[in-house]
Amino acid sequence: MTTRARRRRSTPRRPARRRSTPRRPARRPRGQAARRRAREQAFTRFALAALVLASIVAFAREHPVATVTLGILATATLVFLARTGRLHLPGSPGPRQDVTHTLAAFQHMTGTQFEYAVADLARRDPAVRSATVSGGANDRGLDVLVVLRDGRRIAVQCKRYAEGNRVGAPAIYTANGTYRAYHRCDHAVIVTTSRFTRDAELANASLPEPLRLIDGRGLARWIGGGCPPWG
């Protein structure tokens, strides 16, 4: 037997070492933490509601007449806001959400489609009695005639322009010269999907009764439930 073979037999093999993997601390299930937070929030709301209710009861016992008066005023205010569309009570139908009434959709419409879309948007206001499209080749600055329930007549001129094409001062002069004398309206509004030039804004500011100018941002706010131009 050779010397190398003896060395191989006499040298014992060392067992392989196992790498110690650090144990991660056990995490709490997310569902339990979420349920605990929900219970804490519910308890907090319940405690606040109980505190408010106790304060109201104590105030009502000491001042019964004032409590009845405040209750009547609060009820009348809620009814007024609900009827004017400024407040949507739980369970009542809110403003309609229509995918066709977005600024991007308006920008892809034709001029006639834009006029009908603005008329439909105006009818969403509870203060509007009627909104009629009357645009055409010789509309003389009137595309949509809006009649409010209080009797006021609003002449609306619609300008569906691309972003780079702005409404100039001639549109201001045309609408201002016809909405009262020719269309017998009380106010005039110009609505555009684009913006107004500086000259148009200056021309409108110089008028004794400036028109209401609604650019793309204002139209987006109106679409999102904001105040209408005649509000």
Image (cartoon, rainbow, N blue to C red):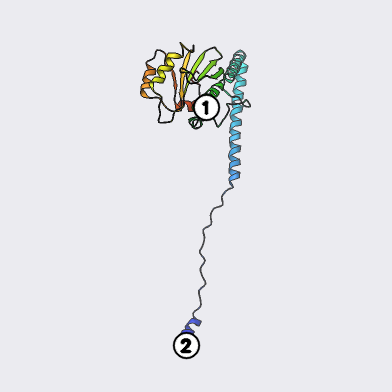
- Name the residue rendered at 44%, 17% in the picture: 175
Q: Position of residue 7 (x, y in %)?
A: 47, 83
In the image, which is nearer the foreground, mark 2 or mark 1? 1
CA distance for labels 2 and 1: 102 Å
Instruction: In the displayed orientation, state which residue is furthest to the front.
Output: 137
- Mark 2 sits on what residue? 2
> Where's residue 195, x and y in %?
41, 26
Q: Nearer the viewer, residue 74 or 106?
A: 106
Residue 186 picture location, percent across and down:
48, 12
Up/down of 211 relative to 107, above or below? above
Q: Which residue is mark 1?
A: 113
**67, above or below 220, in the image:** above
Which badge, 2 or 1, is on the more N-terminal residue?
2
Circle 1 crowding by C-alpha within 10 Å: few under 14, some 14–19, many from 20: few
Secondary structure under tag 1 reads helix
Left or right: residue 170 compared with residue 130: left
Which quarter of the picture shows residue 85?
Answer: top right
Q: Residues within 10 Å of mark 2 (few under 14, many from 20)?
A: few
Q: How many numbered dots are placed on residues in this image?
A: 2
Residue drawn at x 59%, y 22% is 55
Disc ID at residue 60? none
Q: Residue at x 58, y 29 (%)?
A: 48
